[in-house]
Amino acid sequence: MTDACHSCGACCAAFRVDFHCADLASAAGGFVPVALTLPLTATLVRMRGTDDAPPRCIALAGEVGKSARCTIYEQRPGPCRDFAPYAPLGIGDDACDRARRRYGLPPLSVG
């Protein structure tokens, strides 16, 4: 696991995060704290702050690109778990690179 990914936070301050309400802690088997979300539809919720301009997830602490961290990392929703799956290994993808560019950061890796 590289420090470049887990201290970056660019993805948490670049994209909207919507997911099924089954991921909420109030649902059987769910884990995302309800207070950190906004309802969108009967079955869809959004992480607070991710539709702000500029976006910044409410669960993100610290400064993007320097010492950022997810305060609910073990409880993060599916889209966050699925985002750039190899980034912790130092291998970014197009979405990761776009988020990092937004903050003047270089890509995680060339490839």
Image (cartoon, rainbow, N blue to C red):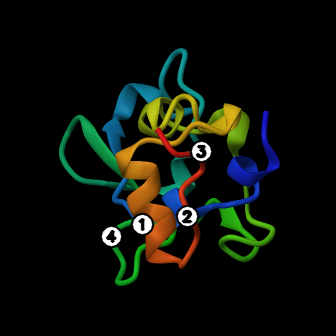
Q: Which mark is residue 78?
A: none
Give the alpha-carbon distance from disc 2 to disc 1, as whole Å.
6 Å
Image marks 2 and 1: residues in contact by CB distance under 8 Å: yes
Front: mark 1 or 3: 1
Which residue sits at x=43%, y=41%?
A: 93
Q: Which mark is residue 10?
A: 2
Front: mark 3 or 2: 2
Which residue sits at x=54%, y=78%?
A: 104
- Mark 3 and mark 2 lie on one chain; the one further toward the N terminus is 2
Give the alpha-carbon distance from disc 4 to disc 1, as whole Å.
9 Å
Under circle 1, the secondary element is loop
On screen, residue 68 versus residue 18, left or right, reads right
Under circle 4, the secondary element is loop
- Residue to which mark 1 is pinned: 14
Image marks 3 and 4: residues in contact by CB distance under 8 Å: no
Nearer to the camera, 26 or 67 = 67
- Residue to which mark 4 is pinned: 51
Q: From the top left corner, tell me how far across and down residue 109 is, in percent.
A: 58, 46
- Mark 3 and mark 4 lie on one chain; the one further toward the N terminus is 3
Mark 2, other Cα within 10 Å: few <14 / some 14–19 / many ≥20: many
- Residue to which mark 3 is pinned: 33
Rendered-image quadrant of the N terminus: top right
Front: mark 3 or 4: 4
User: Mark 3 belongs to which amino acid?
Assistant: Pro
